[in-house]
Image: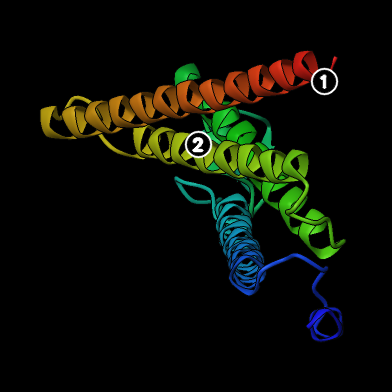
Amino acid sequence: MEGVVVQNGLLPGSSWPNNQFTRYENNNQGNYLEQMRGSLMVVATVIASLTFQIAINPPGGVWQSDTDHNSGCAHNICKAGTSILATGDNDSYNKYRYKVFIVLCTISFSASQTIIVLLICGFGLRNKLIMWLLIIVTCVSVFCTAGAYVISLRMILPFDDETIYHILLYYMYFWLALIGLLVLTLASRFVFWLLKKFFRFICCC
C-alpha cells in the first residue's frame, strides 16, 4: 500500500481526500491569479489608451491654425494644434483646472504603464506585496481618471446650469465616498495582516 502511495506522489500516512483537496485548492488559486492578472492587464491597457487620447485631444479642442492675440490667443501667437484652454485668452481658473487635468491624466497614464510593465516582466501575483502594489496602483489610476473626467466637464460645460452642477456634485461625492471606503477597507486588512504576523511571531518565540 505504501508503494502505491509513494508512486502516486503521496507520503506514507497521507490520505487521498486531503491530497486531492489541496491540489484542487492550489489549482483554483492559480486560476484566480491568472484571471486577476488578465483583468489588470485589460484595465491598465484601456486606461492608458484613454488617457493618451485625452492628452492628444484635450477638452475644448485645439487651434486649427496659427492664431495671434487678436483672435483670442493669450500669447503673441498660438501654434496650430496647441490646446485652446491652455493658451487661450480665457479666465485664470480654467487654466488652473487645465493644469490639474493634465497632472491627473499624467498620473493615470503613468500608473497604467507601471502596471503593464510589471505584468509583462512576469512579477508573480503569488507575492502579496506585488499584488497589493498592483491593486493600489490600479485604484490610483482609476481615481485619477475619474478626477480628470470631472475637471474636463467643469471646463467645457456651463457650471451655472443647476442640473449639471448637481450631477457633477453627486458624482464627486460618490467617488469621495468610494475612495474613503476602499482606503478604510485596505487599511483594515493591512492592520489585520500585521497583527496576524505579530501574534505568529510571538507564538514562535
Circle 1 residue = 204
> Residue at horizontal 76%, vertical 44%?
130
- In this image, 67 relative to 13: left or right? left
Q: Secondary structure at mark 2?
A: helix
In the image, 170 versus 181, the foreground residue is 181
Q: Which residue is mark 2?
A: 143
- Give me the residue at 56% from left, 59% from top: 43
Quadrant assignment, res 96: top right
Please give the label number shown on residue 5. none
Q: Residues within 10 Å of mark 1 (few under 14, many from 20)?
A: few
Residue 1 placement: quadrant: bottom right
Estimate the x, y position of residue 4 in percent, counting from the top left. 80, 86
Mark 2: amino acid: Phe
How far apart marks 1 and 2 lie (CA) works out to: 41 Å
| Count of residue discs | 2
Residue 174 visible in the snapshot: yes
Q: Nearer the viewer, residue 155 or 84?
A: 155
Query: Could you tell me which residue is drawn at 74 percent across and 58 percent down?
Result: 116
How busy is the neighbourhood of tag 2: few (under 14 within 10 Å), some, or many (20 plus)? some
- Can you give x and y, in whole percent of width and height, for residue 142 in the image? 52, 43
Q: Residue at x 54, y 36 (%)?
A: 144
